[in-house]
Amino acid sequence: MEHASVFVYVLVGFMILGSLVAVETADLLSAAICVGAVGFALSVIDLLLGAPDLAVTQVVVEVICLLSLIHI
């Protein structure tokens, strides 16, 4: 279980870095890609913690949000 907790901490660090890049970038496509990466990392964390239903819901919401952001 320790290996999974280390992986969760790495993913949380990746999520913080991705959210900072999404906030600071001037390009909207790069910001949308960073938001998608943060959502994907969150769904992987949900899978590691034993919530596959929440992970699938997160992926569906992320895809819909990213498609709407890129379309605008």
Image (spheres, grey):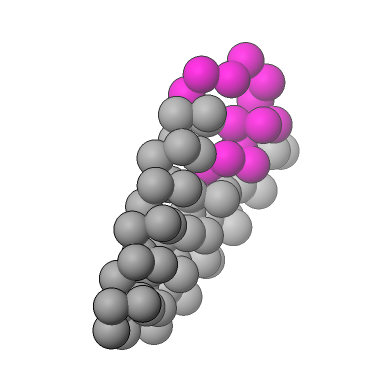
Q: Is residue 15 above or below residue 42?
A: above
Where in the figure is residue 4, as x and y percent of width and height?
Answer: 35, 76
Residue located at (45% from left, 69% from top)? 44
Asked whether 69 or 37 is in front, the reply is 37
Q: Is residue 57 above or below residue 33?
A: below
The magenta segment is 23-35
Q: Quadrant of the C terminus?
A: top right
Where in the figure is residue 15, as x and y percent of width and height?
Answer: 43, 47
Residue located at (51% from left, 66% from top)? 59
Quarter assignment of residue 64:
bottom right
Q: Is residue 9 above or below residue 54?
A: above
Where in the figure is residue 71, as x and y percent of width and height?
Answer: 71, 38
Quarter assignment of residue 3:
bottom left
Q: Is residue 68 shown to the viewer in this render? A: no
Where in the figure is residue 8, as x and y percent of width and height?
Answer: 35, 64
Residue located at (59% from left, 20% from top)? 25
Q: Is residue 37 shown to the viewer in this render? A: yes
